[in-house]
Image: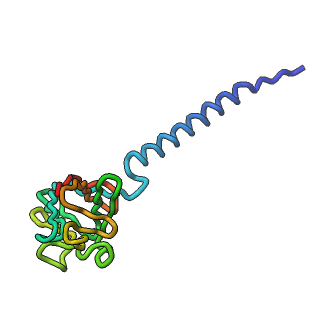
Amino acid sequence: MIMRKDSAVSPVVGVMLMLVVTIIIAAVVSAFAGGLAGNTHKTPQTSIAATATLPPSGNETVFANNGGDVLDLNEIKVMFQSQDTKTTLTTTDVGTNCIAFQKVGSTSSTMIKPGDSFKIVGKAAGYGTGVTYGSFAMYADSKITWSVIDKVSGGTIATGTVVL
């Protein structure tokens, strides 16, 4: 009677398969962690200050780029929030939710360099005591939180508050 022992083949194949699977998983994780798996966009870094004026002095919010990266108005959105109410505005909202979303001093350029400012002009709210941006309203003695957000990466560029 001839006895065969093939038991050594199965553990060797099993160990090799586990090793190959481990190497493939490590390569995939490394590719995602290293940014090779997709096109990543860096969020601009800049210091922004905001001021808002109410009627009769004006009906706009002005954002000043105090230093950092250059911003393109077509690639940002501005979110205003007061308690549970908020709105997000972009350059495409001009004519519907705001009157203007433009560089201060220029209607043709959309690039906001350090030292430049941009403004969002709203409509005067009832009896000239506030400003509306679509369904969102700012009134005297209210605290408004604002955020400038990069549309491409979704990252927040700057945030702050304005007390009217």
Pick whichever, 81 or 164, lies toward us.
Answer: 164
In the displayed image of the protein, which residue is found farthest to the left?
115
Find residue 152 and report its horizontal and vertical position in percent: 34, 62
Q: Position of residue 113 (x, y in %)?
A: 14, 65
Residue in the foreground of this view, choosing between 105 and 40: 105
Extreme residue toward the right, this view: 1
Residue occupying the point 31% across, 64% down: 136
The residue positioned farthest toward the front in the image shown: 127
Q: Quadrant of residue 99?
A: bottom left
Q: Quadrant of the N terminus?
A: top right
Q: Is residue 95 above or below residue 21?
A: below
**In the picture provided, is 87 more to the left or to the right than 107?**
right
Q: How many marks?
A: 0
Residue depicted at 51% across the width and 41% down the height: 25
Res 101 visible: no
At 11% across and 75% down in the image, what residue appears? 105
Depicted 123 relative to depicted 45: above or below? below
Quadrant assignment, res 120: bottom left
Placement of 67 over or under 33, stated as above or below: below
The location of residue 55, given as percent across then percent down, is 15, 70
Does the image show residue 78? yes
How is the rendered protein coloured? rainbow
For this view, does 44 lie left or right of residue 85?
Answer: left
Where residue 33 appears, x then y in whole percent? 40, 45
Q: Residue at x 33, y 76 (%)?
A: 96
118 or 144: nearer the eye?
144
Of the 4 image quadrants, the one containing the C terminus is bottom left
Q: Residue 66: name its quadrant.
A: bottom left
